[in-house]
């Protein structure tokens, strides 16, 4: 008998002995298909038999043990029809003498790690084996015999290489998605879903429909195209109401996968070709198999290089099937009931492979609840901690402040004035200030921070301002000097100092000295200010600019250089109010939602890709007038080569062919921080006419001379991010332009981009972004690094937020530190949530 059939027989036999629990192979019988198909072909097994095996085993796990027995027997019978020597029922099959352990022999690297590969329901099985030793023990893989299973979260921290089909190479690719453990997989939620659950007869298909069609293969043709350089496979399927052509390009191996007369289901988008409806490269599968890829609500995951949607979905399916039900639900039953939530296991299962839109909704609600709940618990704790200490009081008279304000080169906007009032009250409250000033790019946050610092300095104490880059720090430094040490200022220049990475050693020493003896009042800098040897005489005011760019520890570090100093964090990320209340619940918030007068709103146009030349013409015109331009490319993931290439490649073309007469600079994420700073400085100092860049262009940098922002691949950005980028221009008095060029013309994408053309308000756009794309997108790491823990909670869902906050509040009153024994699991989950996330802003 052929080795591949021999192998089948062994496993079927084992499975029979295991009472059809789908345990003969770790991860289920279907797992063997990963390699069996190839071996069977190598053995010359007929395609009919291979497909029979494949389809039965794929659906095996879904059926009851009785059904499984029938299925295997039927399958073996079918095999016997073609290969009579194999035609005995598996349990009667003769046992060949001593065999090699078969299951994982092809993958020795994974053998010793394979314990967690066991499905939860297998756990009792090895014991049964021991209790009832068999006379003639069947060949067992070591893994099955020696496996232990634990339902504790520890099992979920197993590395992904324990999965069949995940070797070191794939594990590395998965790591790029942030996936290292089984637990990470459970929480790697689909980016979106395709609802293929609606079957449609061919007759009623319409152009652009996204559907699943069930039909029988009528014909399969393969033909060369483009002079033999490529090939296309055309499959006609029919369902009695009509027939549909599906095509696959350059996948010649598919041609013998489709069998005439076989029923398949295909899912995808209906296209048009020469007036007829067609489908191009749809997902497909034989109809008997479990409908993982078609005929259901299909999850779509974010991918990375080397990983396909189908592959990841398969991996996800095995992880979810076995592990989601085994996850321990830390949320106390009482809270779950009160908030009417489904169990965590159900939620994790349904969020990946929803059985219906309704169950998906419940799953999302449960997972969203958890996020808000844990976030709120943490925020309450922080607020309590911060309220428990005293803060030094600083107060100034109206007259004193009036003098400061009249020395400014402009009048504060009403919103700046309100923020300043808030800060003034905080400083005089006897508690440390803990305030977030949130204001659109260019709304004028710096001056508010400077005035706050001046109040504290006038009270005899010191202030420190930390910005994420030296160019920003330098910009603040110049502003502070202008505002506080200019004519009629309250300080001398030498009392305000700049401390960045490349400050000379002697200057650094002088600054350290001055801060320690109190002769320097304000230090402005980068991470350099939190170095251990920087000590203050009396630090009472700490400002963190672009707060999301800093880690929790760095903020804490700066704060610890004083005794309960007042803290002001600033952000330009527009956050809708409902979100701010949740994420920054421990902070008081001031919003600067009014722009200084005299700003020319940026005019925004959405161009088609083929209109690019118009954009170049406009750029040339502006540069002729002495202005500068940005050209920005998307960078989805800095670690991915593809995206970095876009900017680098185009830079070549742009500088050699499009603008050979102009000076172009290049900025991308793979450059060192010092190199980036250098390029930015050169651009600011007009050594470049055009800056070609990935999204790394620094937030907050003021280059008033730049008047054009061209964004390539604009559809790949969130609205909030587009708005941030647009904020780089329009800072001077000259009318500025923002040009958006999407990668392709898609109606919905264009709707989103058109919103950019309609409004200049970051808050409006942020709200719209939430509605159109959901919080997952909005809270993407790059837009809001502090809230990456919120993957599921819909921040627009005020009801859910309220519910979670209510429950958190109630629990916090009963057991603020989760020290009661019945909250032990919850305490653990809470630690995990806060340990992994960056919800802390203080
Ligand atoms: P951001 O809020 O983005 O940090 P900045 O503080 O850098 O904004 O301010 C942007 C520009 O606006 C600066 O050049 C600043 O001098 C100017 N500015 C700030 N407030 C006003 C105002 N009330 N009127 C006019 N210009 C202002
Ligand atoms: Mg700023």
Image (spheres, helix red, strand yellow):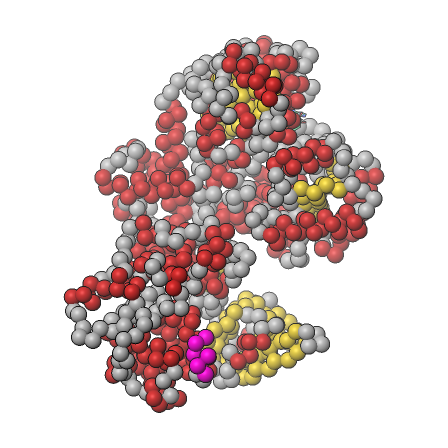
Residue at point 26%, 58% (across, down): 148
Q: Which residues are magenta?
A: 38-44
Q: Nearer the viewer, residue 162 or 392?
A: 162
Q: Is residue 575 above or below residue 282?
A: above
Q: Quadrant of residue 798?
A: top left
Residue 43 is covered by the magenta coloring: yes
Q: Is residue 154 above or below residue 320?
A: above
Residue 679 is covered by the magenta coloring: no
**Residue 291 % position (x, y):** 43, 69
Residue at point 72%, 41% (across, down): 665
Q: Nearer the viewer, residue 175 or 135?
A: 135
Observer able to see residue 355: no
From the image, which quarter does the C terminus lie in? Answer: top left
**Residue 369 % position (x, y):** 38, 45
**Residue 366 % position (x, y):** 37, 50
Q: Nearer the viewer, residue 687 or 192?
A: 687
Q: Is residue 622 above or below residue 595?
A: below
Residue at point 57%, 45% (across, down): 768
> Main SS type for the magenta part?
helix
Q: Quadrant of residue 709?
A: top right
Q: Quadrant of residue 719?
A: top right
Residue occupying the far left of the picture: 131
Q: Is residue 410 left or right of residue 165?
A: right
Image quarter for ligand 1 equals: top right
**Residue 129 % position (x, y):** 20, 67
From the image, which quarter does the N terminus lie in? Answer: bottom left
Q: Nearer the viewer, residue 253 or 332?
A: 253
């Amino acid at each position: 008998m052929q080795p591949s059939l021999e192998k089948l027989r062994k496993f079927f036999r084992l499975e029979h002995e295991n009472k059809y629990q789908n345990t003969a192979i770790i991860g289920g019988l279907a797992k063997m298909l990963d390699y069996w198909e190839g071996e069977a072909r190598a053995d010359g097994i007929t395609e009919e038999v291979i497909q029979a095996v494949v389809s039965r085993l794929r659906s095996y796990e879904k059926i009851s043990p009785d059904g499984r027995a029938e299925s295997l027997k039927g399958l073996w019978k079918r095999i016997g029809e073609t290969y009579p020597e194999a035609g005995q029922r598996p349990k009667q099959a003769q046992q060949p003498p001593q065999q090699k352990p078969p299951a994982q022999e092809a993958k020795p690297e994974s053998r010793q790690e394979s314990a967690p590969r066991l499905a939860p329901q297998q756990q009792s099985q090895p014991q049964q084996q021991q209790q009832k030793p068999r006379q003639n023990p069947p060949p067992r893989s070591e893994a099955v015999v020696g496996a232990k299973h634990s339902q504790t979260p520890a099992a979920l921290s197993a590395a992904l290489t324990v999965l069949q089909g995940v070797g070191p190479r794939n594990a590395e690719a998965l790591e790029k998605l942030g996936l290292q453990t089984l637990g990470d997989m459970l929480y790697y939620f689909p980016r979106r879903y395709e609802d293929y659950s609606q079957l449609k007869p061919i007759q009623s298909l319409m152009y652009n429909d996204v559907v699943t069609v069930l039909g029988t293969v009528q014909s399969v043709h393969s033909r060369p195209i483009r002079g033999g350089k490529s090939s296309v496979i055309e499959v006609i399927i029919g369902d009695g109401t009509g027939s549909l052509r599906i095509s696959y390009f350059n996948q010649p191996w598919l041609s013998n996968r489709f069998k005439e007369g076989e029923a398949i289901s295909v899912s995808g988008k209906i296209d048009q070709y020469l007036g007829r409806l067609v489908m191009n490269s749809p997902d497909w599968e034989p109809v008997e198999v479990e409908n993982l890829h078609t005929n259901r609500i299909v999850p779509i995951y974010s991918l990375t290089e080397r990983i396909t949607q189908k592959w990841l979905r398969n991996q996800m399916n095995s992880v979810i099937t076995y592990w989601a039900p085994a996850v321990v639900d830390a949320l106390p039953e009482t809270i779950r009931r009160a908030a009417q939530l489904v169990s965590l296991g159900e939620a994790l299962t349904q969020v990946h492979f929803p059985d219906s839109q309704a169950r998906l909704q419940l799953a999302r609600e449960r997972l969203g609840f958890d996020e808000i709940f844990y976030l709120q618990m943490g925020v309450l704790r922080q607020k309590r901690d911060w309220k428990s200490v005293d803060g030094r009081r600083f107060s100034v008279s109206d007259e004193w402040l009036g003098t400061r304000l009249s020395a400014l080169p402009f009048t504060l906007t009403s919103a700046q004035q309100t923020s300043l009032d808030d800060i003034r009250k905080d400083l005089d409250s006897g508690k440390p200030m803990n305030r977030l000033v949130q204001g659109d790019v260019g709304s004028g946050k710096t001056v508010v921070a400077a005035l706050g610092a001046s109040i504290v300095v006038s009270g005899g104490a010191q202030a420190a301002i930390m910005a994420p880059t030296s160019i920003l720090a330098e910009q603040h430094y110049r502003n502070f000097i202008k505002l506080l040490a200019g004519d009629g200022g309250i300080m001398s220049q030498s009392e305000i100092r700049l401390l960045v990475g490349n400050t000379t050693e002697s200057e650094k020493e002088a600054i350290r000295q001055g801060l320690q003896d109190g002769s320097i009042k304000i230090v402005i800098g980068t991470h350099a200010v939190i170095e251990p040897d920087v000590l203050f005489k009396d630090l009472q005011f700490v400002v963190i600019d672009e707060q999301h760019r800093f880690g929790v520890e760095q903020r804490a570090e700066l704060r610890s250089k004083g005794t309960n100093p007042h803290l002001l964090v600033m952000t330009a990320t527009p956050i809708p109010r409902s979100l701010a209340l949740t994420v920054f619940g421990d902070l008081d918030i001031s919003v600067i939602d009014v722009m200084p007068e005299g700003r020319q709103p940026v005019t925004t146009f959405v161009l088609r890709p083929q209109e690019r030349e118009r954009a170049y013409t406009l750029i040339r015109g502006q540069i002729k007038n002495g202005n500068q331009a940005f050209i920005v490319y998307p960078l989805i993931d800095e670690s991915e080569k593809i995206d970095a290439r876009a900017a680098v490649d185009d830079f070549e073309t742009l500088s050699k062919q499009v603008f050979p007469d102009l000076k172009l600079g290049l900025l991308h994420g793979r450059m060192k921080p010092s190199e980036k700073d250098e390029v930015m400085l050169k651009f600011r100092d007009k050594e470049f006419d055009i800056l070609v860049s990935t999204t790394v262009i620094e937030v907050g940098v003021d280059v008033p001379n730049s008047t054009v922002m061209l964004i390539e691949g604009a559809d790949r950005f969130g609205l909030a991010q587009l708005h941030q980028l647009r904020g780089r221009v329009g800072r001077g008095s000259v009318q500025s332009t923002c040009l958006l060029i999407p990668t392709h013309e898609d109606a919905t994408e264009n709707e989103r981009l058109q919103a950019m053309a309609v409004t200049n308000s970051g808050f409006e756009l942020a709200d719209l972004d939430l509605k159109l794309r959901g919080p997952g997108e909005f809270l993407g790491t790059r837009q809001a690094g502090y809230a990456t823990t919120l993957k599921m909670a819909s921040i627009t869902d005020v009801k859910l937020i309220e519910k979670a906050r209510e429950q958190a509040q109630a629990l916090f009153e009963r057991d603020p530190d989760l020290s009661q024994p019945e909250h032990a699991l919850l305490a653990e989950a809470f630690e995990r949530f806060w340990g992994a996330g960056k919800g802390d802003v203080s």
